[in-house]
Image (cartoon, rainbow, N blue to C red):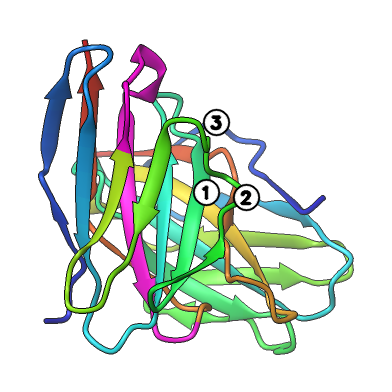
Amino acid sequence: AQTVTQSQPEMSVQEAETVTLSCTYDTSESNYYLFWYKQPPSRQMILVIRQEAYKQQNATENRFSVNFQKAAKSFSLKISDSQLGDTAMYFCAFIDGSGNTGKLIFGQGTTLQVKP
Amino acid sequence: GEEVAQTPKHLVRGEGQKAKLYCAPIKGHSYVFWYQQVLKNEFKFLISFQNENVFDETGMPKERFSAKCLPNSPCSLEIQATKLEDSAVYFCASSPSGYGYTFGSGTRLTVV
């Protein structure tokens, strides 16, 4: 079965510093997509970053970047220059790209607190 | 519009009552997904549609849950005879391809 594991239930970081959230996944597929979603207290699900497994280059979106290690099945999220607005729950998620239904498989989530 | 519209935002039902949630996907998106997020923040996949056809219903508790996506109408998720354990936030998401989602803001269902 395909699984996504986030081993850090809670993290905290000082404003302006850098933090890395961990995610590992398990799949036998070679074609898939990985995502990080942010869920603030409003509960809105916001896409932070997306990575296609066939791309070797790590995805980057402004202050957010990933370290995608395909062989190790690891997909960590780095947040640079942390801001108070980054305080939220972060979910790692996986979609099997081999022609299935596009169902997202989520990790358990990591609560990130950015401290002033 | 460019948002997935879910209604209502909040719904309170007595145990045993029916609950019906609605989702208007983004125009042009042919895939619709429903997820349940329980209080522990875990997401559970319920069902997906490709246009009006059920694509994957492996997550649906079939005894009490049903869903539809009919042409020219919002999609709906209906729970007959709600139970306390159905209390959760229900998210709808739509996608043009099945690989890139836009989520709605969710419906919080409270069963008392």
User: Label 1 sits on what residue type?
Assistant: Phe
Q: Is residue A15 visible?
A: no
Q: Residue at x 32, y 21 (%)?
A: B81
CB atoms at circles 3 and 1 under 8 Å apart? no
In the image, residue B97 above or below residue A24: below
Q: Which region shows up in magenta?
A: B79-97
> Foreground residue, A8 or B92?
B92
Q: Quadrant of the C terminus of chain A?
A: top left
Horizontal side, residue B51 vs residue A3: left or right = left
- Disc 2 crowd, CA 10 A, few/some/many (<14, 14-19, 20+): few
Circle 3 chain:
A
- Disc 1 crowd, CA 10 A, few/some/many (<14, 14-19, 20+): many
Q: Which residue is mark 3?
A: A9
Disc 3 versus disc 1: distance between alpha carbons? Answer: 21 Å
User: Which disc, if any, is residue B45?
Assistant: 1
Horizontal side, residue B74 vs residue A47: left or right = left
